[in-house]
Amino acid sequence: MLCRNPAEYVRETKKDIVPVQRNYDPDLHPFEVAREYTRAMNAVKVERIFARPFICSLDGHRDSVQCLTKHSTQLSLLLSGSCDGEIKVWNVAQRVCQETIPAHNGFVRGICVVPDGDAFYSVGNDKLIKRWSMANYETPTMTIVGKHVFTSIDHHYKSGQYATSGETVSLWDEQRAQPLQSFKWGADSHARVKFNPIETTVLASCATDRSIVLYDTRQSVPLRKITLQMNSSTLAWNPLEAFVFTTANEDYNLYSFDVRYLQRPFNIHKDHVAAVIDVDYSPTGKEFVSGSFDKTIRIFPADKGHSRDVYHTKRMQHISCVQWTSDNKYVISGSDEMCLRLWKAKASEKLGVTRNREAETLEYNDALKEKFAHFPKIKRIATQRHLPKHVYHAKREHKTINESQKRHEANARANSKPGSVPFVSERSKLVLQEEE
């Protein structure tokens, strides 16, 4: 006797979808690949149609935005410093400026928030380190007068210590007005200093003599130093891999290093056509965002050599700072035309509530796009991006220059004595010297 369960084919309500029985035997579905290819094509087209990454701009600064940092405990709070000495506290969720603080005379060079989120530090061209309470912005709770201009500041992720960069890299304690120790290794000054979020006793700095120096706060001397071909603007540590950091270089590229082997970078990230100014990792450690002097923002997969997306607007000028929010959903940029911009980390992602069926469909579409990613038509649609005219022409020019250099080297090798013109990989050319 046949026995059927009505729950398998009867709708619960009139608005529900009629259940359909499916047999997943591939012999019964000879055109499955063709149908999935069509669905993948539609999915990648829809993704590009709904790619609207720009959300809003936060206006209010009266000079170029110089530095940017996110709050350590509150997702919606953001702090930015400008070239006129003002620090603004933003509520990104409400898109309003909560407070404007006349903090320094001259540029605000760096801001960092303490781990518990109750206070933050700022440094500027006036040689001052100021501590501000998040409960009262009227006057700083502490002011330290330094001997030289501070170029950046970063706080320890667990203890009450912070580091500043300038003529030297100095380690400070919150309870003292004098540095605990100062590090110097040949460079005139240091542009940026960053603590490692995992190995919290390790920090790194970018020096003006084209070098990157690693330090350990438990020792009195620097650990290691590498000298590159060109100067590095800043660096960012991977939040999930303690031994990986990425540096933004003035030769238009970003370089990912492993501290266990600094003779060469393990990855080169290309696509910018001007000096890269800032870089910041996502909380997952799988991607990072970079801002460049070419007026664009690019998002790179950490293990790929080219960007997956590029953001730009007609009015946006040179990018000075970028941040990836702690919820992994948004990217924030600051630029020379005195405003901050909020972007979606995934350009086509829907903002708001997503129903279960919609989430399942999006997951299915992502699987299809990954399955057919290397098919020519789908790959062309998925990777094509419209670029500003100056970026487009600069990219073509750089391509012509690189092809010419490779052709010149190949001709020299072909017409020389065997072995006299050895082949040197691009990654091996970058690091000129390593010192310990």
Image (cartoon, rainbow, N blue to C red):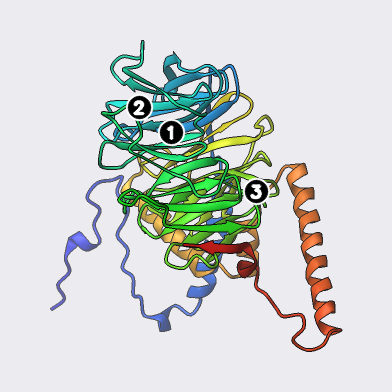
What is the CA distance from the residue labelled 1 to the residue labelled 2? Answer: 10 Å
- Res. 145 visible in picture: yes
For mark 2, give the secondary structure.
Answer: strand
Quarter residue 112 falls in: top left
- Res. 234 visible in picture: no
Give residue 92's position: percent from left, percent from top: 42, 27
The answer to whether the residues at label 1 and label 2 have Cβ atoms under 8 Å apart is yes
Q: Residues within 10 Å of mark 3 (few under 14, many from 20)?
A: many
Q: Name the residue under label 2.
A: 120
Residue type, label 2: Phe
Instruction: Give the residue drawn at x 70%, y 49%.
Output: 273
What is the CA distance from the residue labelled 3 to the residue labelled 2? Answer: 30 Å
| Pair 1/2: label in front | 2
Which sits earlier in the primary sequence, circle 3 or circle 2? 2
Q: Mark 3 points at which residue?
A: 250
Q: Mark 1 points at which residue?
A: 69
Give residue 264's position: percent from left, percent from top: 55, 67
Residue type, label 1: Thr
What is the CA distance from the residue labelled 1 to the residue labelled 3? Answer: 22 Å
Classify 33 as above or below 381: below
Disc assigned to residue 407: none
For mark 3, give the secondary structure.
Answer: loop
